[in-house]
């Protein structure tokens, strides 16, 4: 009988991490049966790789970012947070009898679900890092969960946090890494680059309404930067839901929009013509399927995202951040990213971006893309903070080791009971 694994995660980034690990698990052990319980959001990362979803899914008004603004928790509760969480818990309890082992990605909520499942589990605390404050001050509930016998191993996103937790007395912790980095490689997609010009990547995030607002700010920043250096070229990596909004975005901002296709490649060209205020025109080519190529081939990232910025920083890219209205990418989130990612990141302004802040950010972009010494320092910083790559295999093998131990123990107990 094949082994069965339940994956639990509580966040969009956590779903993404988990999906990469699952792809590796399937490559190592194709007969392994895997289902998922995404506690926040629709679980699209799981659905893309045909992982069955256990229980109901829903999207929170806060996007799951109540830790950035506790008042948003009230909106989530009004939207049915407690009822839906209870339904998800009930769905897990109904399903868990079919499962041999649990893998949980996330913070307290996801790990609590794993513990309450009654099954042994491996924890990947991907949102947490000691690099924010120099020491990981974990909440008491999560600490107690990770110390229990039911939790067989704990993986962290960076080596610094693993070492910090070992010093705090958590012997079962190990360095995992960022799974999505393992597949962050150029695919050879033609993104229409002029090789003699610097390229700036625009990453506005993945939650549609917020990403649309963020992208409008990034368009204005690109226009400002083009006035200082008309040779810059801009590429935007948009999720499909934002790509469908580009015509409306262009209309709102007074830009021209042209959909283009060559063979099976589709992209959108956004352009702002020269006028009295902005004598240099600017063009942004937008893609919904070229994140890896854009991130890997850019010279600098203008980022208003979480995981995508982490990935770009890890492969050595300089990052310029501007804050938006949220719910995710506020100044508080951007400032936390500064502490996590170190010298590779510069946040401009201490509030949602204003025209003045955008001008300042544009000047910083233009200066930074020409700073070769800084670019080299960013490469070293990325390797030191998030290397080495290979997280998917490390975490997948960690799960399989403890899954095998758990199923062997269950078989032994069954044999003993039947003797």
Image: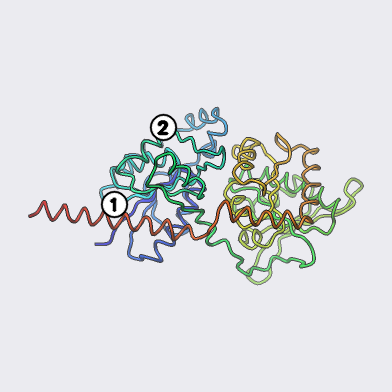
Structural distance between the alpha carbons of marks 2 and 1:
28 Å
Q: Is residue 128 left or right of residue 140?
A: right
Q: Is residue 129 visible?
A: yes
What residue did someone put label 2 on? 140
Residue 274, horizontal then vertical, whole percent: 88, 52
Figure check: 169 above or below 308: above
- Find numbered disc 1 in the image and state the secondary structure of the residue it sits on: loop
Instruction: Report crowding for label 1: few under 14, some 14 to 19, many 20 or more residues within 10 A (C-alpha).
Output: some
Question: Residue at point 46% right, 52% down?
Answer: 175
Residue farthest right in this picture = 276
Quarter where residue 83 is shown = top left
User: Camera-side residue: 346 or 187?
Assistant: 346
Question: Residue at point 59% right, 48% down?
Answer: 206
**Which of the two labelled residues, at mark 2 and mark 1, occupies the earlier sequence position?**
1
Q: Which mark is residue 99?
A: 1
Q: Is residue 278 left or right of residue 324?
A: right
Quarter where residue 348 is shown = top right
Q: Which mark is residue 284?
A: none
């Amino acid at each position: 009988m094949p082994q069965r694994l339940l994956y639990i995660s509580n966040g969009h980034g956590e779903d993404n991490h988990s999906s990469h690990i699952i792809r590796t698990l399937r490559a190592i052990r194709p007969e392994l049966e895997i289902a998922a319980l995404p506690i926040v959001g629709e679980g699209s990362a799981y659905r893309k790789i045909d992982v069955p979803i256990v229980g109901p899914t829903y999207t929170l008004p806060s996007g799951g970012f109540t830790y950035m603004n506790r008042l948003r928790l009230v909106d989530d509760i009004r939207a049915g947070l407690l009822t839906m969480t209870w339904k998800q818990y009930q769905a897990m309890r109904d399903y868990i009898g079919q499962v041999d082992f649990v893998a949980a990605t996330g913070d307290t909520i996801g790990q609590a679900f794993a513990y309450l499942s009654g099954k042994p589990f491996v924890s990947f605390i991907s949102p947490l890092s000691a690099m924010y404050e120099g020491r990981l001050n974990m909440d008491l509930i999560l600490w107690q969960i990770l110390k229990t016998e039911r939790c067989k191993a704990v993986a962290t996103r960076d080596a610094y946090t693993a070492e910090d937790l070992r010093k705090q007395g958590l012997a079962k912790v190990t360095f995992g890494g960022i799974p999505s980095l393992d597949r962050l490689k150029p695919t050879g997609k033609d993104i229409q680059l002029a090789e003699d010009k610097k390229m700036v990547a625009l990453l506005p995030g993945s939650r549609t309404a917020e990403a649309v607002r963020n992208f409008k700010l990034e368009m204005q920043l690109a226009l400002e930067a083009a006035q200082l250096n008309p040779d810059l070229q801009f590429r935007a990596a948009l999720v499909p839901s934002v790509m469908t909004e580009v015509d409306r975005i262009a209309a709102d901002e007074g830009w021209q929009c042209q959909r283009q296709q060559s063979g099976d490649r589709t992209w959108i060209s956004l352009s702002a013509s020269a006028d009295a205020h902005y004598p240099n025109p600017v063009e942004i080519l937008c893609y919904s399927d070229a994140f890896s190529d854009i991130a890997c081939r850019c010279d600098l990232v203008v980022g208003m995202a979480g995981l995508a910025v982490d990935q770009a920083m890890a492969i050595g890219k300089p990052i310029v951040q501007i804050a938006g209205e949220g719910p995710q990418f506020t100044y508080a989130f951007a400032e936390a990213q500064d502490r996590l990612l170190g010298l590779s990141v510069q946040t401009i302004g201490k509030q949602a971006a204003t025209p003045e802040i955008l001008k300042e950010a544009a000047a910083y972009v233009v200066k930074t893309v020409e700073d070769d010494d800084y670019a080299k320092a960013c490469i070293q910083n990325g390797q030191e903070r998030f290397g080495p790559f290979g997280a998917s295999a490390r975490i997948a093998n960690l799960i399989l080791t403890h899954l095998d131990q758990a199923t062997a123990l269950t078989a032994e107990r069954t044999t003993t009971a039947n003797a």
